Amino acid sequence: MPLSSPMAEYSLKETHTFEFFLFLTDASERQLIKFINDLEKKLLQIAKLSYRRIKDCGTKISISTFSEEYLESILTEISNAYNISLCASLPPYLLSNKNSLLMEFDQISSWNNTSIHYNFLKSHFTVTITGNEKKVFKTRTEMYKLIEKMHGRAPSSISTPVHAADILASGGHVYFESKILCTNALLATASSEYISASKPKSPVFKKDLVVDKVSLLYSLTYMRLSIEDILVKNETYITNISYLNSTASIELTGFCKKLLKDAVSEMEMLFISIITLKIQKIDPYTTAKVFLFNLPSYILVVGETCEVKKILREIDMQCEISVLIPPAIEEFICGKKNGKLNKVARESDCNLTIRKDAMISVLIQGGSHNAEFSLSMIEDELPTEHSFYLHEKHHKRIIGYGGKSIQRLMKKNGVYIKFDSTTEAENNVIIRTPTKNKESLYKMYKDVMELAGETPYMMHGAWHPLSFSDFYALGAQRFRFRINLIEVFTQEPVDIQYYLVELHASEKKRAIYTIGDKSVVASDTHISESELITTDTWANANSVSTYFSWKYEEPLFCDKLIWGKHWREKGFSDSWNSTPWKSSFTE
């Protein structure tokens, strides 16, 4: 049974016009225009495209289809071409050769037809890459490839699934590209080392997830980075997507059964957040990131809950919202004999019903403002959970005679707990509670561990973010990848800084980079008799160009030279002849 099919109850065969939105926050003006032109060329034979600006911050694209059979192709083209942004945080010592580095970055960006933006902070600088999804990942990978070469390592590109933990255990570095229908990655090792990633050591597990087709295409357009983050965090790939009528089957592949299960659960919650809204009209100047299907008698809106709420706040009229819920959590959300739904209906003054066709959905009918309130209350009832491992020898004592001990704890914290000694997964205890009560998850976990006489792992630390460069400079025993960074499990937040020091021959292994006759060392504590490296270390206030950092006594056209006696004494020709780049113009 499909997990999420918000479009199943509505027919799109009579769709006359499909609309969606682009925003300047997601791309530059030039990239927006290029996206529209490229899309228009691709759809020339099957649809007519038009667009208009909205509030100087976005563009509304309208596509009139010549036939409803082309709708899937149109949505696929949009999801594949939509722009995303990735951010890379880089260490300040790379700026010792700033102009050469930035020129290389700009060339990489130009080759891949992406745009980049720099932001220089004191402790690091960031590079934000914007463009088509595949090209953005490719740009970032090539930038890291350049950086790895600067460090004397041997980077190589591969096109096969790899287990990050195995690569790091072998002393390598790994940078993933997209994990959606793609297995490209960059591996980097010391020049004398070799890592084989063609045959992963870990067994590969697979699981299929069936979702609504339009919801999937919406998520690949507006929520792609959220999906990528789920996949990276759980060491999982989407290896195949197949479409059948109104549904899509997603094949997920992973190296760990528990992480694969976690990835599926997070994907399920992501698709639950995509809802449909049936309404007569919307604000023509809305800036919500939604799909709009103009049907003969109404408009069907498909979007993430937070985006649909924007539309509900902008109008005041009757509407119908459909929220799909998996059968496994129906009673959890609705309550016994729909008690929770009845409470929501009374407090929001809306009509709530359960529809059970091919799948289960909660229908909310009422005024738009009341419907938004009702939707928020249902969101509060969505489950959130925490799973962990506890040795089976503790289970019976914690449950107590007749279950009295565990019932007391569940009532105290307002949660549900399940012990499963037969599970094959790594975690055999699951605590679940409504989202509105999620702070009780840790309280319940702590109570259970105290009864068992064990120390909660949360007492040992928490997850803290590090950039890829910072992580590879120092490393950590417990880590997990995210799309733009790596999280490490430590007691305190880690603040890594870089120092310029003179090392003896026996200490050269500590160096991660060499600048002149000095070495760069990374540390989370202060290093005495060293120079702290910041982005200002090699700053040149008198630089005439971004790419020319030679130091002058004075800029050529500063006020002091133009109006002062110094200018008349020195003369322009003398200033010109003293510049090291004069030869590049005269040769």
Image (cartoon, rainbow, N blue to C red):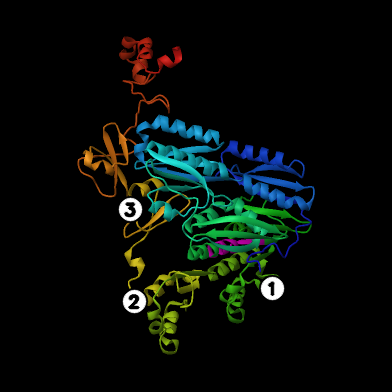
Going by the numbered disc 3, the residue's amino acid type is: Val
Q: Say above or below: 310 vs 80.
A: below
Q: Residue at x 33, y 74 (%)?
A: 454
**Alpha-carbon neighbours of circle 3 within 10 Å: few (<14), some, or many (≥20)?**
some
Q: Where is residue 104 in the image (x, y as percent from the top left)?
A: 46, 32
Q: Name the residue under label 3.
A: 494
Reading the chain from its start, which is encountered first: label 3 or label 2? 2
> What SS does tag 2 mark?
helix
Q: Is residue 80 visible?
A: yes
Q: Describe residue 389's horizontal placement relative to residue 54 as left or right.
A: left
Q: Which disc number belongs to residue 356?
A: 1
Q: Where is residue 248 in the image (x, y as percent from the top left)?
A: 66, 59
Prevailing secondary structure of the magenta residues: helix
Using the numbered discs, state the Cα–Cα distance from disc 1 to disc 2 in whole angstroms: 43 Å
Q: Which disc number belongs to residue 450?
A: 2
User: The magenta stretch spans which residues?
Assistant: 265-276
Q: Describe residue 172's horizontal placement relative to residue 22 as left or right.
A: left
Q: How many marks?
A: 3
Q: Which residue is drawn at 55% across and 37% down?
A: 112
**Alpha-carbon neighbours of circle 2 within 10 Å: few (<14), some, or many (≥20)?**
few
Reading the chain from its start, which is encountered first: label 1 or label 2? 1
Question: Is residue 570 magenta-colored?
Answer: no
Q: Position of residue 36 (x, y in %)?
A: 66, 40
> What SS does tag 3 mark?
loop
> What SS does tag 1 mark?
strand
Q: Quadrant of the N terminus?
A: bottom right
Reading the chain from its start, which is encountered first: label 1 or label 3? 1
Using the numbered discs, state the Cα–Cα distance from disc 3 to disc 2 in whole angstroms: 29 Å
**Alpha-carbon neighbours of circle 1 within 10 Å: few (<14), some, or many (≥20)?**
few
